[in-house]
């Protein structure tokens, strides 16, 4: 609540031209709060606020901005400024920024860095952004199994600082192969004369460097991890992943799932230019127009029947809507189940059977109520039977479609969160209209 008040005050200050007041207010904000402020401001105010920040704050804020807004500011930064940013950011965060730049500029920045920093960044850049390698940091502190805890403690005391989220030291052998983890709690509470081998935890499994970031998030969630070692195919330690990066993955996946249903990009800028926003949304509206035309074409086939029985035009939306809601419920449940690893080949048949029974029971319940209402309002019992049959059939079809679509789309390499809703709506509309109007055409012929 306090931050929202500060945000509103800063935006109002910009409108009134109170620059000194704005600069004073900015100093009281944290880096992620400044990022939120920039994303919440129109382009003109956004760039003015950016100019009020010092270089170190700019570098810290860059990490918290979404890709589209971040790209605006990266375009105005020269190589020296980008290299300076590397010193203020974690390796994985800086790698994320470099991936947004043209390859020529990325190479210039890398050549301008010292050898050690360049090697760390290039190690992360060599892996896909959505993999464990793209998430990891290369700042892990390693120890050998034969080391005494006393030696480890002396080494740590000589350090000016420890990497963030350090809850344990990673144990490797002479070949840098992962062996286990020495928890800091064990290190501090155990006799210093004991060796690392005697107290290290060998049950913590390392994360393969090519594992998808979504799978990494599941492991962290299930095992309540703060950090985890990352290894290559030979078992050699290449870095570690920390919980802050995993939380970002979870939030991004959740945002993507919500925005995808409306055809919006994960990094959609709330205050993007009119032309850019219009172009993006026009594509999605065009796709939906095609599906609407298909549904209209089905209705057109039965226009003579609709002319005879005008009540059909009033009742058609009920059939399509009920199917759409039932299908969406199942589709959402399946996408979530697949994402969390709850649904697979072993239990998909049981799930389909359960969803079929649920759909049938719900269909019979609401179809009966609607049939009674239609028969009473339109004084036509036959029409009541027709809409009841159409509702039950469409709800069942929609539910089965919602159950199967995510798996089918995933196999085709299509994101079910993005395309599932549109395809499902098309199926429920066409099926609902065709069944209801087809039955009416046959009955009232």
Image (spheres, helix red, strand yellow):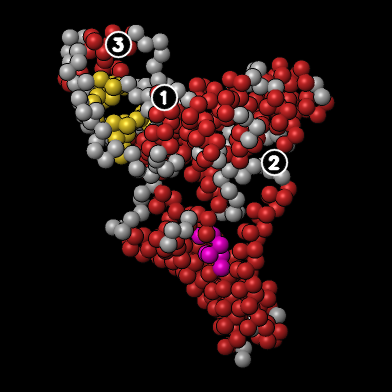
Image spot of residue 41 (x, y percent): 71, 34
For the residue pair 348 and 108, the one nearer the viewer reads as 108
| Left or right side of 345 for 196 | left
Secondary structure category for the residue under label 1: helix
Secondary structure category for the residue under label 3: helix
Tell me which corner region of the image, top left, top right, bottom left or bottom right, holds residue 157.
Answer: top left
For the residue pair 328 and 14, the one nearer the viewer reads as 14
| Left or right side of 270 for 63 | left
* Residue assigned mark 2: 271
Sequence-first disc among 2 and 3: 3
Secondary structure category for the residue under label 2: loop
* Residue assigned mark 3: 155
Q: Looking at the rendering, in which quadrant would you find the N terminus?
A: top right
Image spot of residue 143 (x, y percent): 25, 20
For the residue pair 331 and 255, the one nearer the viewer reads as 255
Q: Count up the numbered dots.
A: 3
Residue 364 seen in the current view: no
Image depth: mark 2 or mark 3 in front: 3
Tell me which corner region of the image, top left, top right, bottom left or bottom right, holds residue 220.
Answer: top left
Image depth: mark 3 or mark 1 in front: 1
Image height of 70 relative to 363, above or below = above
Image depth: mark 2 or mark 1 in front: 1
- Which contiguous range is marked in magenta? 420-426
* Residue assigned mark 1: 115
| CA separation in Å, label 2 and label 3 | 50 Å
Q: Which mark is residue 386?
A: none
Image height of 21 relative to 95, above or below = above
Image spot of residue 258 (x, y percent): 55, 48
Assess whether residue 389 is covered by the magenta stretch: no
- Give yes or no for contact between labels 3 and 1 (Cβ–Cβ under 8 Å): no
């Amino acid at each position: 609540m306090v931050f929202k008040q500060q945000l509103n005050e800063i935006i109002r200050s910009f409108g009134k031209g109170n620059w000194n007041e704005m600069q004073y207010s900015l100093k009281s904000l944290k880096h992620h709060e400044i990022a939120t402020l920039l994303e919440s401001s129109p382009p003109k105010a956004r760039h003015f606020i950016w100019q009020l920040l010092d270089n170190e704050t700019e570098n810290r804020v860059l990490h918290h901005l979404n890709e589209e807004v971040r790209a605006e500011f990266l375009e105005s930064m020269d190589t020296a400024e980008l290299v300076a940013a590397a010193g203020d950011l974690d390796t994985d965060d800086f790698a994320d920024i470099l991936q947004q730049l043209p390859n020529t500029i990325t190479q210039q920045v890398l050549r301008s860095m010292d050898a050690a920093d360049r090697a760390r960044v290039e190690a992360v850049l060599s892996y896909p952004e959505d993999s464990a390698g793209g998430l990891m940091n290369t700042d892990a502190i390693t120890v050998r199994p034969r080391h005494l805890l006393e030696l480890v403690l002396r080494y740590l005391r000589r350090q000016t600082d420890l990497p963030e989220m350090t809850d344990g030291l990673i144990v490797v052998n002479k070949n840098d192969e992962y062996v286990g983890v020495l928890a800091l709690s064990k290190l501090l509470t155990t006799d210093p004369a004991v060796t690392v081998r005697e107290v290290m935890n060998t049950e913590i499994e390392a994360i393969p460097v090519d594992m998808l970031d979504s799978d990494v998030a599941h492991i962290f969630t299930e095992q309540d991890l703060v950090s985890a070692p990352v290894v290559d195919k030979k078992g050699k330690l290449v870095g570690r992943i920390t919980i802050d990066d995993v939380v970002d993955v979870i939030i991004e996946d959740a945002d993507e799932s919500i925005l995808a249903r409306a055809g919006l990009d994960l990094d959609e800028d709330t205050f993007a230019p009119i032309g850019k926003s219009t172009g993006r949304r026009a594509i999605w509206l065009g796709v939906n127009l095609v599906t609407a035309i298909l549904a209209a074409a089905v209705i057109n086939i039965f226009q003579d029947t609709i002319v005879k029985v005008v009540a059909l035009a009033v009742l058609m939306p009920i059939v399509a809507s009920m199917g759409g809601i039932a299908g969406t419920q199942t589709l959402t449940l399946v996408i979530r189940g697949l994402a969390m690893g709850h649904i697979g080949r072993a239990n998909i048949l049981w799930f389909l059977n359960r969803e079929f029974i649920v759909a049938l029971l719900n269909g019979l319940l609401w179809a009966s109520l609607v049939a009674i209402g239609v028969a009473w309002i339109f004084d036509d019992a036959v029409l009541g039977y027709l809409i009841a049959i159409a509702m039950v059939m469409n709800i069942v079809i929609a539910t089965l479609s919602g159950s199967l679509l995510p798996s089918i789309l995933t196999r085709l390499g299509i994101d079910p969160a993005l395309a599932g809703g549109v395809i499902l709506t098309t199926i429920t509309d066409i099926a609902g209209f065709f069944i209801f109007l087809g039955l009416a055409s046959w009955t009232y012929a």
